[in-house]
Image: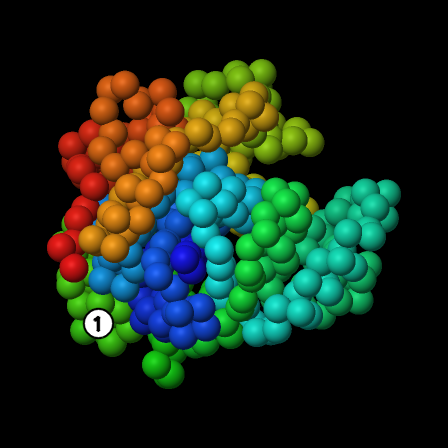
Amino acid sequence: MKILSLITEYNPFHNGHIYHIKKSKEIVNPDVTIAVMSGNYTQRGELAVTNKFNRAQAALDYVDLVVELPLLYATSFADDFAYGGMFTSKKLGASHIVFGSESNDIEALKSAYLKSKSISKNDLAPLLSNGYSYPRAISELTNEPTLKEPNNTLGISYIKATDILNYNVSLHTVKRVGNHYSDNKLSQSEFSSATSLRQTLLNGEIEKANQFMPKHLAEKIISDGVVTNEVMFETLKVIIERSSIEDLKKIYTMTEGLEYRLKQQIIEASSYEDFINKIKTKRYTRTRLQRLLIYVLLNITNEDYNNYTPEKFRVLAMNQTGREYLSKIQDGSFITNVTKKDALDFYYEIKGTRIYNTLTNQRLNDFNQPVIIHST
């Protein structure tokens, strides 16, 4: 069987994602298509614009199975995000993986990965200390232009993960289409970035959003209330103010005295955006700090991450094809409906969803929302 896995966020699900799914199916001609999807928090350190159940429901019109990417992988930097996606895909028995990239050249990406393997920590250290991001530092040292584009960089992380996992999977890539992923304005073409759609939804411009994403999803998001990181500012302020320096030091990726910077700047900050601007420097990028604040919010420590290897995975949605395939996986790793006996296996996902719901006044959680099933 050909089992296609797509490692995704769908924040929100839009026409570019539909294009990616369709092109991936054209390449692979799979028997089963699976989306391994982030839950309520994303790799860029953001609360998802709408909950994981709404996004899984939308994706199920185009894939057979939606499985949640474990939270600690979903909220980590590119290499760990990719590792988590590949780890989950391997558990699912995926034979093919297709990801988006700017280059649309899998051999060029594999070559760039081999070049990056030759770079030592000693070579990297001077650039990182001068504020270079890890991908930019690797790009400078290898003179490899593909590393300057974000989706190419993530693609190389996928290749690296297959190497680490000794995962014999067929890798393919589809050219990313539409405007740049960070553009706030809607595209003039057929596809627009998730960033621009989040801003459009936040503005309440539903007719404009409907041009680039499933209409029912846009209406649902606006009806529920568009989620942004601003909703966690007051909670973060309380956590940081009441935490000791020693407590903050234990938080995952809290390095080089960042705990002092957070303590100092939270006092004067008037909003989440203001706080990010106050703590951001050349050395500490926005995305790096946004992820750190998610760890603060969820109290994810270095110990949590260092001891983390998930054994069970949450199935969010499936159609009949996905259901039949899932029944063939006999190891008990994939759970369709979470019960109290599973609670420890999904500790981070359950906690994350409860905090997400508290911040957004929503009610769907891992216990009261069963797996979403489509009959076809």
For the N terminus, the image quarter is bottom left
Residue 130 rendering spot, x and y as whole percentages: 77, 49
Residue 134 rendering spot, x and y as whole percentages: 69, 51
Q: Residue at x 36, y 54 (%)?
A: 34
Q: Is residue 124 above or below residue 13?
A: above
Q: Is residue 224 above or below residue 207?
A: above
> Which of the 4 image quadrants contains residue 199?
bottom left
- In the image: residue 6, left or right of residue 80: left
Q: Residue at x 46, y 41 (%)?
A: 91
Residue 64 visible, this angle: yes
- In the image: residue 262, left or right of residue 42: right
Q: Residue at x 68, y 70 (%)?
A: 108
Residue 133 visible, this angle: no
Task: Please identify the residue farthest to the right as the structure is shown.
Answer: 122
Considering depth in this image, is 112 or 223 the residue closer to the camera? Answer: 112
Residue 43 rendering spot, x and y as whole percentages: 47, 47
Q: Is residue 246 above or below residue 370?
A: above
- Identify the element where label 1 is drawn: helix
For the C terminus, the image quarter is bottom left
- In the image: residue 370, left or right of residue 273: left
Considering depth in this image, is 289 or 115 the residue closer to the camera? Answer: 115
- Give the labeled residue for mark 1: 210
Count of all numbered marks drawn on residues in the image: 1
Disc 1 residue type (three-letter)? Asn
Residue 198 rendering spot, x and y as whole percentages: 33, 60
Q: Residues within 10 Å of mark 1 (few under 14, many from 20)?
A: some
> Which of the 4 image quadrants contains residue 289?
top right
The colour scheme of the drawn protein is: rainbow
Q: Residue at x 37, y 25 (%)?
A: 345
